[in-house]
Image (cartoon, coloured by chain):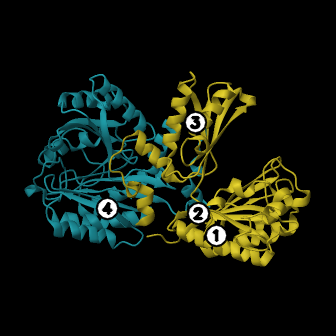
Chain colours: A yellow, B cyan
Amino acid sequence: MHPMAIIECIPNVSEGRRGDVIEAIAAAIRAVPGVRLLDHSADASHNRSVFTMAGDAAAIKAAVLAMYERAVAAIDLRTHTGEHPRLGAVDVVPFVPIEGVTMEACVALARDVAQEVAARFSLPVYLYEEASANPARKNLEDIRRGEFEGLAAKMASDGWAPDFGPAAPHPSAGASVIGARMALIAYNINLNTDRLDVAKKIAAAIRHSSGGFRYVKAAGFTLGDRGIVQVSMNLTNYERTPIFRVFEAVKREAERYGVSILESEIVGLVPSAALNSAAEYYLQIAGFKPDQILENKLRNA
Amino acid sequence: MHPMAIIECIPNVSEGRRGDVIEAIAAAIRAVPGVRLLDHSADASHNRSVFTMAGDAAAIKAAVLAMYERAVAAIDLRTHTGEHPRLGAVDVVPFVPIEGVTMEACVALARDVAQEVAARFSLPVYLYEEASANPARKNLEDIRRGEFEGLAAKMASDGWAPDFGPAAPHPSAGASVIGARMALIAYNINLNTDRLDVAKKIAAAIRHSSGGFRYVKAAGFTLGDRGIVQVSMNLTNYERTPIFRVFEAVKREAERYGVSILESEIVGLVPSAALNSAAEYYLQIAGFKPDQILENKLRNA
């Protein structure tokens, strides 16, 4: 049915300021046949870049190794500063199943790449999310807590030996977190108010960590330049916690404070299935099959 | 940006009972390189079949001519009976722009095919919808009124000379209507009631012909086996009269009679853009770009 398996990979690299380093990494990814670099963006205050690429397992693996080659050589965590928490030069590498490929295949790829990275660069690697074999080391935030500066002590403590590689940090490149997960949707809802407490209360109501939906991370922020507030979210499994259910919950919580939704925004990419499920829900479409979408039918014909 | 222009063509043929004739037409379409026959379905009581194919202009033209070859040889309107109105053996042939192709290109293709069909089969052809050069002959129902049985008299009357071909009907194959139009969405809304008058009043409120939306055709029906009623619609331009606006209007009209929407259904295929616009609307997504859909990004990368 599918001409080719498509896996997405979104490495987060601890360099957001030196354009030449970022461009060299992008060029190394682009040079791998069968890989498409869909996007890359750098944030100077975070001092961090995100690369989005797609391809089949073999091509993606080659591109990730090429990226490590450049990043480990160019980035030194001992002099790195930035607002975003980080553990290593190549901080996090998630593999995401997109089309014609299972989560299990992405887990296998994550472990294969982790093993090779550890061996080739003498770098400790932790597995996370679906690739993790350790319940206490599934969540990225738990693994990254203490950051690069606390890494040597953390690695020496009980339960923090890495999944692959040496038992102590790489001197300049720290450690890496590699894993597999569902496609993540970065989704923000802007409220018709400047009351930050309302955004924070709604975020607390809907996020998993404080009792909300299983696959929602959320925080409340002020958008100072616009005089409004935002509930900023990551939806980490749009099949089990769909976007429309989160939207409706935020809307209902906001009403309780006399506040309405001004607009929402999707940051970056979204799988079409996540949007289609919202259309299906609101239009109350019964018995809909993905094959009824003209483009799917054409692609699979 | 697009590897290939994709045009959809959905011929309606006046044969829904003889499986061998229908299969021979399907085989003739399938045999044309570069054309994909996405679907075909036959209705015995209508005595009519609908074929859905896609390809670029040259391939689609070859497939349509091959289909005419079979249909004109096998179908005789003088002995044809069925519930659906019809003018000819190949009754209607619409060309629809899907991807990487303009409406203007589909209009040009419709005229080119019409001219060739008229010459090759000595068949009168009327142009309709976007391909029509005559405001009084834009609407399919107006052209088809009187059907095959009234065709000779109609063609002899003022203003009904065909766009191409002879001035009198083909003895067995009648005439054809060929044109270009937007993708059509067959969309039904089922109501939580058995009151047919409510479905009929709602249909009248929303359809163009009686004062409703410009690109909606609608009628009310009883679904006898389920004890409910249905507002059955064709949405003829989902960009200008979007599916969500129609859904909301039906919902509001139903409320006025104390009735709610049980469910809706999309019959056959729907362009993904029509579903995405519903998600955008209900989720109040600001500044969304089609390029943010992962699959689009991948396809265009």
Determine the residue located farthest toward the right in the rendered image. Answer: A79
The answer to which quarter of the image holds residue B296 is bottom right
Distance between the Cα atoms at labels 1 and 2?
Answer: 9 Å
Badge 4 element: strand
Q: Which circle marks residue A130 in the picture?
A: 2
Which amino acid is tagged 2? Glu
The amino acid sitting under disc 3 is: Ala
Which quarter shows the C terminus of chain A?
bottom left
Q: CA distance from mark 1 to mark 4?
A: 40 Å
Question: Marks 1 and 2: CB-CB under 8 Å?
Answer: yes
- Discs 4 and 3 lie in a common subunit: no
Q: Are marks 1 and 4 on the same chain?
A: no
Kindly identify which numbered label has been placed on residue A110: 1
The foreground one among A263 and B235 is A263
Mark number for residue B39? 4
Residue located beneath label 3 in the image = A205
Looking at the rendered structure, the secondary structure element under dot 3 is: helix
Residue A283: which quarter of the image?
A: top left
Which chain is indicated by disc 3? A
Label 1: element kind:
helix
* Residue B93 horizontal/vertical position (percent): 30, 54
